[in-house]
Image (spheres, rainbow, N blue to C red):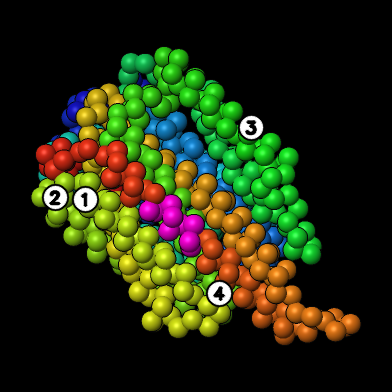
Amino acid sequence: MSHVSTGGKHEAGAPAAVSTPLHAYPKRWFALAIIAAAQLMVVLDATVVNVALPHAKADLGISDSNQQWVVTAYTLTFGGLLLLGGRIADYWGRKRTFVVGIIGFALASALGGAAWNDTSLFLARGLQGVFGALLAPASLALLSVLFVDPRERARAFGVYGAIAGGGAALGLVLGGLLTEYANWRWCLLVNIPVALIAIALAVPVVPESKAHGNTRYDIPGAVLATLGLSLLVFGFTKAGETDAQMNLKYGWGSPVTLGLVGAALVLLALFVVVEARIRNPLLPLRVIAQRTRGGAYLSSTLIGAGFIGAIFFVTLYFQLVLGYTPLKSGVHSLPVSIGVVTAAGLASGLLPRLGPKPIMAFGGVVAAVGMVLMTRIGVDTPYATTVLPALLILGFGLGCTFVPLGNIALVGVDPHDAGAASAVVNASQQVGGSLGTALLNTVAITAATAYGRDHLPASAGGPPDPAALKALQAHAMVHGYVTAFWWGSALLVLAAIVVFVFVKASKTDVAADGAAVHLG
């Protein structure tokens, strides 16, 4: 990617279209700052809303079975459209796609901040995911063409990776601050001023570039993949839907649930057929057919499902059961990010000596242990002795998986497929998170409902004691969360098994120049 060109007209006041190597572009570090700020907005949004969820849920009347859509509406569209977003950035123009992504993300954030019911909030979150799927790959592509010197590129992607890691932690604290001292709506509205500044700076500073050659889009593939995944999440959600008496309306064996899941599987099977036959596939099947890469993508999906799906309940537990304020909840969630950052630094140093397989398999097992430790929670569990060590161990294990994952995802890949291969890593984590959140939310609701029904206090001819019912509700919620943590730990163990069985990359296969650091 050392040469790019736009083929378009040069606008007054805008940087010239680039058709030569960009390593000499004098404003490349300023452009990096702008790109990093925009990416921070996207990363923040993945966690900032988690802390605000209990307040948004109460304000808009969101049901327990539908609460996961606040997360999955974003991660599903984001992950499902990332591959298409990368193609659009390459063919339509990376700067143009970057700017449009920022504008759309800001407008979707405004809609979410003004949400009047649950449907409008879910729609806004879905639109944020759509425009995030344009913004994220355009950002990476711009960095790739701006920094072609290996050492400069390593530093640039190091900054980008720090934004991705630190932004998640910052989102937890910022979400708590905004929810507690302003309003949960500001967790979305805060994106607007950031977007306006990024747009104002990007237009005159960031250069345009695009790829040439085959520029046809795989629209059928994008539609089939996104619709199939959406129906699968919808089917999981229906299985956990309850009525006013907290009885399951459908369950796993109902015709509605089975019909939705069956239709989803048919659409996803059609997606594979289309990708195998179309000349310009969204996901070239040769990318995932190779044993090591396929194992990396499958483990990435399982890690996303186990981690994102289960961590969804941590902030709910802090606020709804332990009674933490939003800010306290955000701060007490930080140990996960601390563990990730600590392990990532260690894993980076060990990767050239040990290779990716042992580090990633070890990380999956350690993360599963942390998740198992979270099953010890109760309605009055002390944070310091129970929750804190569990979150630190969970984060440390995840950090050990993230660094090797980005490297093995590109082992043996053809340069022509490098963009698609790297995009699949991000997409698999987001899609896994969407499916895991929907699945584990239904598992938690089903377990909590059964617990509440089995432990309903005797009324002795009169209405149940309100205090007893409130206590029962807290115990039922904890039982549901614990069940979700057990399932999440099983998914993380399965990810480690997949790595052990399928990944064959050795330390000699790991890239030494840091070019793939952004993938982890």
| Residue 463 occupies quadrant | bottom right
Which of marks 4 and 3 precedes in the sequence? Answer: 3
Labelled pair 2, 1 in contact (Cβ < 8 Å): yes
Q: Place residue 57 in its image quadrant.
A: bottom right
Looking at the rendered image, the quarter that the N terminus falls into is: top left
Q: Which residue is mark 1?
A: 358
The percent coordinates of residue 448 (x first, y second) are 64, 66
Mark positioned earlier in the residue sequence (3 or 1): 3
Q: Give the secondary structure at mark 3.
A: helix
Q: Is residue 486 magenta?
A: yes
Query: Looking at numbered disc 3 in the image, what kind of residue is underneath it?
Result: Ala
Question: At x 29% / y 32%, what residue is drawn?
Answer: 291
Please name which of the two marks, 3 or 1, marks the residue nearer to the observer. Answer: 1
On residue 354, which mark appears?
2
Residue visible at 46% across and 74% down in the picture: 376
At x 69% / y 60%, what residue is drawn? 63
- Mark 4 nearby-residue class (10 Å; few <14, some 14–19, many ≥20): many
Residue situated furthest right in the rendering: 461
Other-residue count near label 1 (Cα within 10 Å), few / some / many at <14 / 14–19 / ≥20? some
Q: Amino acid at mark 1?
A: Pro
**What is the C-alpha distance between the residues marked 2 and 3?**
44 Å
Picture layout, residue 223 above or below residue 40: above
